[in-house]
Amino acid sequence: MSVSLAIRPMDSRDIRSVLAIQSRCYDEAKQESAVSFLSKLISPLQTSFVAELGEDVVGYLVSVPVQDCGPLPLHDTDYCLPGQAVALYLHDLAVRPEARSFGVAAALINAYMSALRSSNLSSGCLTAVNGSSRFWQRYGFRDSTPAGPDAVRLASYGPDARFMTLDLPHPSIRAQRAGA
């Protein structure tokens, strides 16, 4: 009997599973609170997702619209939906270790990319941690590690953190390519 992988929008009922997965994937300094996750679910856009194998949540991806393309502070509990977003910030992706051979990360990233394209935002961005920048380069992200105030926010993610961006063609060009 095969178990199918399903991706769906994350909601507040998923937070317990998200925290459990996070605790298995990140060191204590990078583990965020339930309040931090809940604050990022206020967006009316469906940009955060969970992956289920059968009835078990085995992975998640949290992304939110941001007004400037820079890292969100780690442990931030007061995310506010910006009036004028310019990018979709992929804040967190984690997959239970025993589910990593099922294509969970790729499916969650595909959901993010789809949300990014339908949002009409011009770019995506993320903070790569734990030496994952090469992984993100395979999806088209490039190192854009900042200086100044954004560097201070980035430092909260650890010494190896890299800020990365993905630029999309202008929405009108995307529509032309799609044949619209």
Image (cartoon, grey):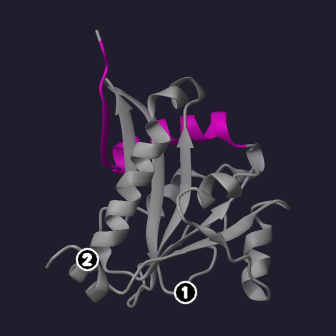
Circle 1 residue: 68
Q: Is residue 17 above or below residue 156?
A: above
Residue 15 sits in which quadrant?
A: top left
Residue 16: in magenta span: yes
Circle 2 residue: 177
- Residue 75 in sight in this render: no
Query: Which range is magenta?
Result: 2-26
Would residue 26 be found to the left or right of residue 92 on screen? right
Q: Is residue 170 above or below residue 89?
A: below
Residue 37, image x and y in percent? Answer: 50, 56
- Residue 170 in sight in this render: yes
Q: Is residue 3 above or below residue 61?
A: above
* 2 or 1: tag closer to the N-terminus: 1
Would residue 124 be found to the left or right of residue 70 on screen? left
Q: How many numbered circles does the render carry?
A: 2
Amino acid at the residue labelled 1? Asp
Q: Measure how far apart labels 2 and 1 are at the Cα level.
A: 27 Å
Q: Secondary structure at mark 1?
A: loop
Residue 25 sits in which quadrant?
A: top right
Residue 172 sits in which quadrant?
A: bottom left
What residue is rendered at 73% in x and 66% in y? Answer: 162
